[in-house]
Amino acid sequence: MDRLLDVVAGLSALLIVAVLSSVRRAHIRVEYSVTWLGAALTLLVLSRSPALLQHIARVLGITYAPLAVLLIAGVVFLIMFFRFSVIVSKLKDDNIALAQRVAILEYRLESAGKNGGKA
């Protein structure tokens, strides 16, 4: 039990360092780093507090408490991936709309040039 929790704590700490390093180098935006930091801190706290972990495992009906950490980690990351999928979808829609607006502006500029400045 302790080995699995130690691995989860180590990976959580590594994730925190990686996210902070990425924010510092401007590889990730701050609003996205908050989600990653929250997930990593949640896993770190759960892996370091056995009483809380036992309680959560009991509530979930899991007999082996460290599996509760893995279950919670999976759920947290699924929620994060869904959130990022929504963000990417919105960005794609915005890019399509922007490309259409640019195409319309280019058409108007070409039309204005052909008409001698009369639009």
Image: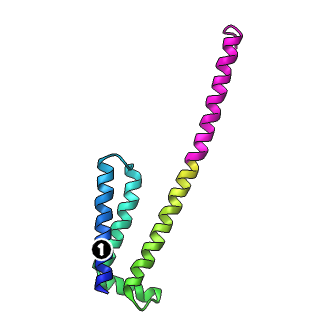
Position of 114 relative to 59 (above/below) = above
- Residue 45 appearing in the image: no
Say which of 101 and 56 sits in front: 101
Q: Quadrant of residue 93?
A: top right
Residue at 33% x, 52% y is 22
Other residues around mark 1 within 10 Å, as few (<14) / some (14–19) / many (≥20): many
The residue under the point 37% across, 57% down is 34
Asked whether residue 99 is drawn in magenta, I would say yes
Q: Classify the position of the N terminus by image quarter.
A: bottom left
Q: Dot 1: what SS?
A: helix
The quarter of the displayed image where residue 70 is located: bottom left
In the picture of the structure, the residue carrying the numbered disc 1 is: 9
| Magenta span: chief secondary structure | helix
Residue 7, image x, y percentages:
31, 76
Q: Is residue 8 left or right of residue 103?
A: left
Amino acid type, label 1: Ala
Q: How many marks?
A: 1
Above-or-below relation of 48 to 104 = below
Q: Quadrant of the C terminus?
A: top right
Instruction: Kindly identify the residue that appears in the image at 41 percent across and 83 percent down.
Output: 67
Question: In the displayed image of the protein, which residue is found farthest to the bottom?
Answer: 63
| In the image, residue 43 above or below residue 117 | below
Q: Residue 38, position in %: x, y?
A: 37, 64
Q: Can residue 98 be spotted in the picture?
A: yes
Q: Is residue 106 magenta?
A: yes
Q: Nearer the viewer, residue 18 or 46?
A: 18
Give the image location of residue 51, x and y in percent: 31, 85
- Residue 47 position in % (x across, y down): 31, 78
Q: Which residues are magenta?
A: 91-119
